[in-house]
Image (cartoon, helix red, strand yellow):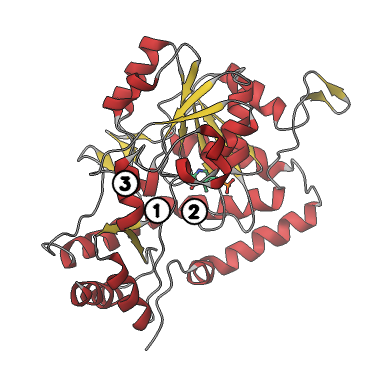
Amino acid sequence: MTKIPLLDLRAQYESVRSEMDAAIASTMEQMAFVMGPAVRELEAAFAAFLECPKVVACANGTDAIHIVLHALGIGAGDEVITVPNTFIATAEAITMAHATPVFVDVHASSALIDVARIEAAITPRTKAIIPVHLWGHVADMDAIMAIATKHRLAVIEDTAQAHGARLRGRRAGSFGDAGTFSFYPGKNLGAYGDGGAMSFRDPELAARCAKLRDHGRTDKYLHEVPGFNSRLDTLQAAVLLVKLKRLDAWNAGRRRVAGWYQERLASIPGLTIPSSTNEVEPVWHQFVICHSHRDAVKARLTEEGIAWGIHYPVPLHVQPAYRSLGYKEGSFPVAEQLSATCLSLPMYPELTESDVDRIGSTVRRAL
Ligand SMILES: *Cc1c(COP(=O)(O)O)cnc(C)c1O
């Protein structure tokens, strides 16, 4: 019985090995390990990919959100709206900026921010909204931008799970004041280590963030503002340049796998597959099913050598780290229900139709 992992980074590496090894070797020849030429090249190439004027690379996706918040002057005493069903980094970036996360529940059908609940969470202290494009789907950016304009709030799209996803043809991360990306190895576009980026429509905000990620410097030893050390390594930029060329094809591969799953998992009583509207071209960072008998499915998959994940088992409002925010169990029933029932199945472009057959029939038998 061959095992099926949640993600197969080795298979991906094998498919690009010679070009990747050459790119890494050439970076070694240049010996420009920090802010070398590949960083600028990646920023330009990723901006072109996103069809967004400016991209600034940084050290990771958490810093990307933090740097944008800092550049927008958001800090102590300010509130930032986001969702409780995300990786903790979204909230951490807010608390790193000394601002307060304010959670808003999500839609059961999409697991994305419920735009009808945003206005009730806005107070005079609210400064920004951070929608999360969870699992490779895209939040309702039209409604979010309309609310933000009306209340003069900034919008930072947490696009760490949705590199390349589109809403009505436009890439996720190009709607708000900024999009933030993680290049953690397991993301749709992943480095061989940590990495991140910020995308902007406003070149002036981009320039401020570029300065902040590199010690606030305007020249080698001239520092205009106190900044951070949050640069993307040249080696990681070189790795990402090799992968970026293939990202659209890899995302199309994920959509093909998602289609196979949707066929095989159709009409199982009680099983739902959260996803966004028809106007979205998702990139399936995770393929997630929800069922009240999740434990039975987990057990069957494990017996069959099929890996699974839960994204995420404990919503942020009940994490020990955020106890001081004063939320309780029951504060966000939809997010809590998703945490209790969601299950991520293997998802990567190299999965075959027979792998999906095996996974699908295992889920069906378990239920
Ligand atoms: C991965 C992730 C981040 C953080 O990215 P890092 O590069 O690990 O710091 C932020 N938000 C979401 C939704 C993520 O999935």
Q: Nearer the viewer, residue 275 or 107?
A: 107
Closer to the N terminus: mark 3 or mark 2? Answer: 2
Residue drawn at (19%, 73%) of the image: 364
Disc 2: which residue = 187
Q: How much space separates mark 3 and mark 1, taking CA atoms?
A: 8 Å
Disc 3: which residue = 282
Residue 367 in the image: x percent, y percent? 19, 71
Looking at the rendered structure, the secondary structure element under dot 3 is: loop
Residue 258 left/right relative to 35: left
In the rendered structure, which amino acid carries the disc numbered 2?
A: Lys
In the image, is the residue at mark 1 within 8 Å of ligand 1 by its beta carbon?
yes
The N terminus sits in image quarter? bottom left
Closer to the N terminus: mark 2 or mark 1? Answer: 2
Say whether marks 2 and 1 touch (CB < 8 Å).
Answer: yes
Q: How much space separates mark 2 and mark 1, taking CA atoms?
A: 7 Å
Disc 1: which residue = 285
In the image, is the residue at mark 2 within 8 Å of ligand 1 by its beta carbon?
yes
